[in-house]
Image: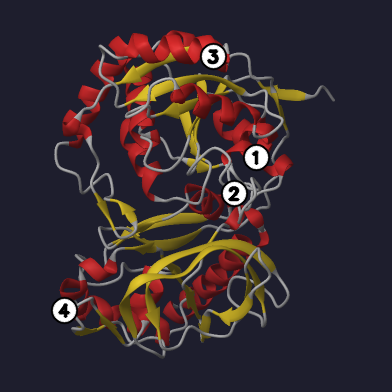
Amino acid sequence: MKKAYCTTPRLMLSATGSDSGKTTMMMALLAVFQQKNVSVQSYKSGPDYIDPMFHEKVTGRSVYHTDPFFLQQDAMQQLVAQTAQHTDLALIEGAMGFYDGIGQTSESSAYTVSQWLQTPVVLIVNPQKMGRSVAAVCNGFLHLEQNHLIKGFLLNRVRSSMMPYYQEIIERETGLPVYGFLPELPFTQLPNRHLGLLTAYEIAQLDEKIELLSNTAQKTIAWEALLKLAATAPPLPLKERILPHFESFRLGIAKDAAFCFYYAENLKMLQDCGAELVPISPLADAVLPEDLDGFYLGGGYPELYLPQLSSNHSFIRSLQNAAKNHMPIFAECGGFLYLLQTFSNQAGISYPMAGLLSGTSAMQDRLCRFGYLTLTAQQDTILAEKGAKIQAHSFHYADSTKNGMAFLVERPNGKQWKEIQQQGSILAGFPHWYFPSNPRVPQQFAKQCIVYRKKRMQERR
């Protein structure tokens, strides 16, 4: 059999650190390519949910994650090859700084991603308040590791009058090109909150911001040269996907302003397992839809909508009835908090929640248990049999009085504890699961939903 390859050009945008303007630069370039009829599949190298929302806003495409903690090298190559094969460009946004990995290492960093995918990198640099020292920064990134993939630079927040000055210094001292710049554009700045940027759907005049970025970038960035650079990436092996056959089922997905954090890979894998995804709003819907076979509540910002969530009594009653009938329900982070007895905001005001699980929750003044996790099932659950492992991530400012004991949780540094509640047909906890790290997990969830569907259909006869 002839070996297949994905020949789609690839490019990574990374940076010297967080808050360097990676997402803004991504939006600018994605918008330019959209304008020029270049179809782009974008990726995020870390576990972030929010940055990909901005990519999707520009391209209209689902965004995938090239995260070395979640995926091994071969699996990452296959993910990119499969999802990028029918596009003109694969564009990857790095996380944090280029070499920022686990602990004090470069492990699972954007650098790792570039090596595994053999993808040329353009480094975003903010040279404000520097002169020739900007060359020391650039050269430091070129030589910290055995690295031949940084191929040039993009400058951010630079006055057009200063661009030739910085470009001459950097190109003379590093021998690599500067592909352009974005000036300071106060109108396009993206506001933050405790979990990072506001989501793309909350930002006023976002379309106008994207248009300004595109119009500016077309004048200040050598986007055609970047496409030529991307074309130097070697082909990726492309393996045929053999998917198991599953019966179809209807899976509710909580999707609204309160619950909006989902990995596109997770939803795609559930669809591959037979799921018809049914968007549901615990904020606005009066009841769960009829003929539902399971419910998946992701993370998000329930803490911002506690009065509305708490006062939607009819929806909560329908969810409680579904749980009594043993509908499979899986909830992560914000979804988990919604299923507890009460949730207290930063002011200490407590609101009744769905009441399907033991314990209460409250917002804290700092992050709780932040970082990468490996989960090991301590018992059979609706998503994983005892002993099964899956990679996950936690990032939350709330804590609960009963986090559960269904899974052993381990950090990369070896620290362990138990977490995640299993109660009847409900499995819920703080970690965000990454299904591609163990494909049997979505398959197990699908099987449970199909069993419930058959039981429900029999009871209707």
Disc on the earlier residue, 2 or 3? 2
Determine if residue 123 is in view.
yes
Which is more N-terminal, label 3 or label 1?
1
- Identified at 69% across, 67% down, the residue is 389
Label 1 to label 2, Cα distance in Å? 9 Å
User: In 3D space, how far apart are the residues under numbered discs 1 and 3 (Cα atoms)?
Assistant: 25 Å
Which quarter of the picture shows residue 179?
Answer: top left
Nearest to N terminus: mark 2 or mark 4: 2
Contact, CB < 8 Å: mark 4 with mark 3? no
| Residue 111 sits above or below residue 325 on the image | above
First in residue order: circle 1 vs circle 2: 2
Secondary structure type for disc 4? helix
| Label placed on residue 112 | 1
Circle 2 or circle 4, nearest the eye: 2
Kindly report which numbered mark, 1 or 4, lies closer to the viewer in this rendering: 1
Q: Give the mark, 1 or 4, whose residue is nearer the N terminus.
A: 1
Residue type, mark 2 in image: Gly
Local packing at callout 4 (Cα closer than 10 Å; few below 14, some 14-19, many 20+) is some
Marking on residue 101: 2
Which image quadrant: the C terminus? bottom left
Task: From the image, state whether disc 1 or disc 3 is nearer to you.
Answer: 3
* Above-or-below relation of 193 to 237: below
Residue 455 in the image: above or below residue 242: below
Q: Tell me if mark 1 has few (under 14), some (14-19) or many (20+) residues whose alpha carbon lies within 10 angstroms of its own.
A: many
- The kind of residue tagged 3 is Glu
